[in-house]
Image (tube, rainbow, N blue to C red):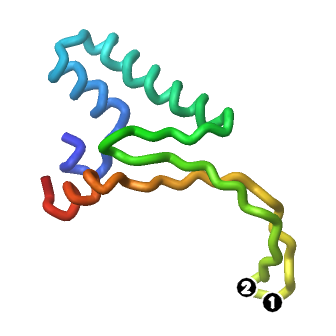
Amino acid sequence: MALDRGTLTRADLSEEVHREIGLSRADSAAVVEQVLEHMCLALARGENVKISGFGSFILREKGQRIGRNPKTGVEVPIAPRRVLTFRASQMLRDRIVSGN
């Protein structure tokens, strides 16, 4: 199970869909892949993804800034970029704290 190794994988998700809903393993894997693909496409289009009770995947635009090479101390420009952040919902945070 996923908790034994500390990481939940796509295979774990599709197996759980198979057990809980009763779809075939192939159909369960296809459902998981379709959901993840839909989320990826939305993020690639610049849309945020919000899953009620779970959290939000939020895209942020970071402007150009000056960084510093830690070895040499030389200033280096860091190009503007888009970053993805995840913000857990309060419900998820509460479940994590309580261990349920």
Residue occupying the point 73% across, 85% down: 70
Figure check: 100 above or below 36: below
Residue 24 image point, x, y percent: 25, 10
Instruction: Tell me which amino acid carries mark 1.
Output: Gly
Residue 14 image point, x, y percent: 30, 25
The kind of secondary structure element at disc 2 is loop
Figure check: 84 above or below 74: above
Residue occupying the point 45% across, 47% down: 56
Q: Are marks 2 and 1 in contact (CB under 8 Å)?
A: yes
Figure check: 19 above or below 79: above
Could you tell me which quadrant the N terminus lies in?
A: top left
Classed neighbour count for the residue bearing mark 2: other residues with Cα under 10 Å, few (<14), some (14–19), many (≥20): few
The kind of secondary structure element at disc 1 is loop
User: Mark on residue 70?
Assistant: 2
Image side of residue 44 versus residue 39, left or right: right
Residue 10 image point, x, y percent: 37, 32
Image quadrant assignment for residue 97: bottom left
Residue occupying the point 50% across, 46% down: 57
User: Mark on residue 73?
Assistant: 1
Instruction: Tell me which amino acid carries mark 2.
Output: Pro
Image side of residue 20 versus residue 72, left or right: left
Image side of residue 13 versus residue 32, left or right: left
40 or 93: nearer the eye?
A: 93
Residue 89 image point, x, y percent: 35, 52
Q: Could you tell me how far apart the alpha carbons at marks 2 and 1 are, in whole angstroms?
A: 5 Å
